[in-house]
């Protein structure tokens, strides 16, 4: 799938988006749509970036306009990560892997 003309939303913290072996940006993968509560999005973004997973955001259906006018997006926020890190990001959101690498079920 060609993404040369694909446009990201606002880049987050500034982690560089990874490139493939040909120097082209790795395909973005949809991770999750979060509710309109901006704090939830910031928590998830911070969690992912703390593990070195770059995140880009998009505010669907004109949500960026609402964010400018009233300070929050009434339509929520979509988060995208590099497809090569999608499984890691999903695991983090599902809480499957604890900080030390053990499964949460193994921790008593």
Image (cartoon, rainbow, N blue to C red):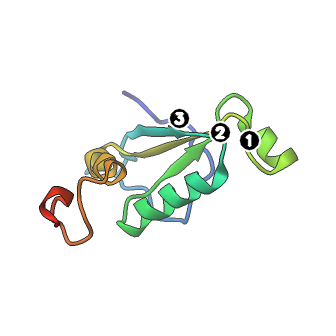
Direction left: furthest residue: 106
- Is residue 11 visible to us here? no
Q: Please tell me which of labels 1 and 3 falls first in the chain.
A: 3
Q: Please, is residue 26 above or below residue 51 in the view?
A: above
Q: Identify the image quadrant of the C terminus.
A: bottom left
Check whether the beta carbons of the residues at disc 2 and disc 1 lie within 8 A of each other.
Answer: yes
Residue marked by disc 1: 64
Q: Which mark is residue 59?
A: 2
- Circle 2 packing at 10 Å, graded few (<14), some (14-19), many (20+), is many
Disc 3 target residue: 6
Crowd class of label 1 (few under 14; some 14 to 19; many from 20; radius 10 Å):
many
Pointer 1 and pointer 3: residues touching (CB < 8 Å)? no
Circle 3: is it few (<14), some (14-19), or many (20+) Cα within 10 Å? few
Task: Answer left or right for 106 relative to 2.
Answer: left
- Provide residue 36's location: percent of width, then percent of height: 66, 41
Q: Nearer the viewer, mark 1 or mark 3?
A: 1
Counting residues from the start of the chain, the first of labels 2 and 3 encountered is 3
Secondary element at image label 1: helix
Q: Which type of secondary structure does the marked residue at label 2 adopt?
A: loop
| Cα distance between the residues tagged 1 and 3 | 17 Å
User: Residue shown at 69%/28% (left/top)?
Assistant: 61
Mark 2 and mark 1 lie on one chain; the one further toward the N terminus is 2
**Residue at figure coordinates x 63%, y 51% from the top left:** 10
Residue 85 location, x and y as percent?
Answer: 30, 50
Q: Nearer the viewer, residue 105 or 40?
A: 105
């Amino acid at each position: 799938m060609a993404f040369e003309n694909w446009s990201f939303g606002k880049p987050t913290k500034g982690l560089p988006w990874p490139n493939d072996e040909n120097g082209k940006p790795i395909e973005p993968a949809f991770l999750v749509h979060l509710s309109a509560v901006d704090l939830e999005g910031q928590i998830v973004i911070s969690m992912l970036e703390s593990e070195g997973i770059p995140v880009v955001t998009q505010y669907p259906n004109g949500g960026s306009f609402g964010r400018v006018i009233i300070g929050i997006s009434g339509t929520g926020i979509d988060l995208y990560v590099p497809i090569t890190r999608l499984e890691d990001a999903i695991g983090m959101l599902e809480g499957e892997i604890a900080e030390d690498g053990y499964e949460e079920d193994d921790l008593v």
